[in-house]
Image: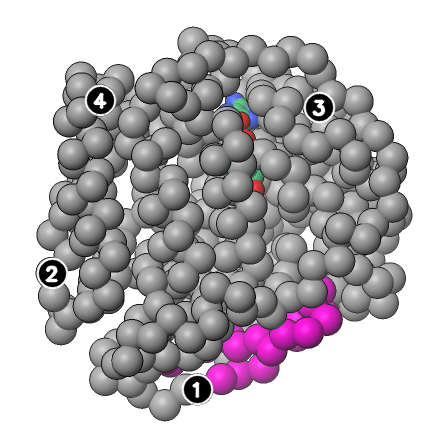
Amino acid sequence: MSAEASSASNDNTIPASASTDDERAGVTVVHHYPLATAGGETAEVAEVAVEQSSTMEASAEEHLSVDDDFRLDDASSYSDYDDQSDASSFLSSLLSSAEDYYWENGRRYHAQGGGRYLLPNDETELDREDMKHHMWMLVTSGRLHLSPIARDPQKILDLGTGTGIWAMQMADLYPSAEVIGTDISPVQPKWVPPNLQFEVDDLEEEWLYKPNSFDFIHVRFMFLAIKDYPAMLEQAYKALKPGGYIEMAELDLNPTSDPEAPDAEKIFEWFKMQDAAIARAGFDMRVAHKFRSMVLDAGFQDVEEHVFEVPWGTWPSEKRQKAIGFWHLEQLKQGLHGIAMAALTRAGWTVPEVEVYLSGLRKEMNDKSHRVLDHGYVVYGRKPRH
Ligand SMILES: C[S@@+](CC[C@H](N)C(=O)[O-])C[C@H]1O[C@@H](n2cnc3c(N)ncnc32)[C@H](O)[C@@H]1O
């Protein structure tokens, strides 16, 4: 992306739907971006600055109507951000050779901590991660971050960087910054922008970074990696410079359904089971709505919460929401096997039992009459300047 895009990236306009929090007025702001219910109200679009994207239109409050045709249109090819990262200059980054993997039911997992991480780290999963990034860029109107960080950040940390796609795009967007992406799995590419390096590290261990050294710390899609969010936030607080920002982005996996649409029985049953299996492993797939309170408790100021409705499938009529729904459902379907196989077999299911169950579930997910949606959260806060 261009330096122009970079320098303008901090002027995010607060959407019209913003409201201050009653309990801690002046400290935190909440923004909601609702979809329309069935029946299709008229779109009410407010302007949001989308300086990080060169091509897209953004909306702060979107009331969308249902697409009665259920046609896919060109949802799969729709893109409203211009991904220039492929064209970036490259230098190599050293990766650890600590490839500590094992195979279970045909999927490759990281073995650190006795296979504590429930998702595989094979190519199928990495493709899904990039798909999720694409979906999230549509959700956030092409913005890699919502925090109003400085125009020339010096140091940025991406915790649990995964494929490293966010870190690579940030390194391109902010040439001034040294970007570090950490992960327990060294699955990131070797050829990356010169101002980016990947490190193998466990974020739940003690961090060895210099206190007060980062301008920005980013934590996205990590609910299956972080058991103790307050401990992570405490370490992030120490590592951030005064005035630096923490940003947490996550899907709160607590889907809701339009009451006027057919009941998505299997989907809700699956979520209940999955929730229990994940809780047994010590994680919380419905943690995102608690971020705002956690970030406040950790001592951050000017905390903002942005809540987006993320449809399952192409049922909304509006083109961008249709594309978001397409990619979200695709990543869920692709992820189903990896997500369910480890969690359920480790909870005592046999592999054939899981496969039969998943095929019934996939059928329901492909049924386009359902109108299910998740909520996506972005919460950020600033470390006090003094
Ligand atoms: C769902 S991916 C998120 C990828 C990335 N943050 C993104 O938004 O594209 C979660 C990542 O967290 C990593 N992870 C799991 N436990 C971890 C830990 N304790 N410390 C660091 N990374 C961890 C996994 O290896 C995986 O790559």
**Nearer to the camera, 134 or 153:** 134
Residues drawn in magenta: 45-64
Q: Residue 206 appears at what percent x and percent y?
A: 61, 16
Q: Residues within 10 Å of mark 1 (few under 14, many from 20)?
A: few
Q: Residues within 10 Å of mark 4 (few under 14, many from 20)?
A: some
Q: Which residue is mark 3?
A: 199
Q: Is mark 1 within 8 Å of ligand 1?
A: no
Q: Which residue is mark 4?
A: 351
**Nearer to the camera, 16 or 226:** 226
Which of the two discs, 2 and 4, labels the residue nearer the N terminus?
2
Residue occupying the point 39% across, 63% down: 325
Instruction: Decide if residue 3 is in sight here.
Output: yes
User: Which image quarter holds the C terminus?
Assistant: top right
Q: Which residue is mark 2?
A: 263
Which of the two discs, 3 and 1, labels the residue nearer the N terminus?
1
What amino acid is at disc 4?
Val
Residue occupying the point 63% across, 74% down: 56
Dividing the picture into quadrants, the one containing residue 155 is: top right
Residue occupying the point 74% across, 33% down: 180
Dividing the picture into quadrants, the one containing residue 13 is: bottom right
**Nearer to the camera, 23 or 163:** 163
Q: CA distance from mark 2 to mark 3?
A: 45 Å
Q: CA distance from mark 2 to mark 4?
A: 27 Å
- Quick one: SS at disc 4? helix
* Left or right: 139 in relation to 331: right
Q: Which residue is mark 1?
A: 44
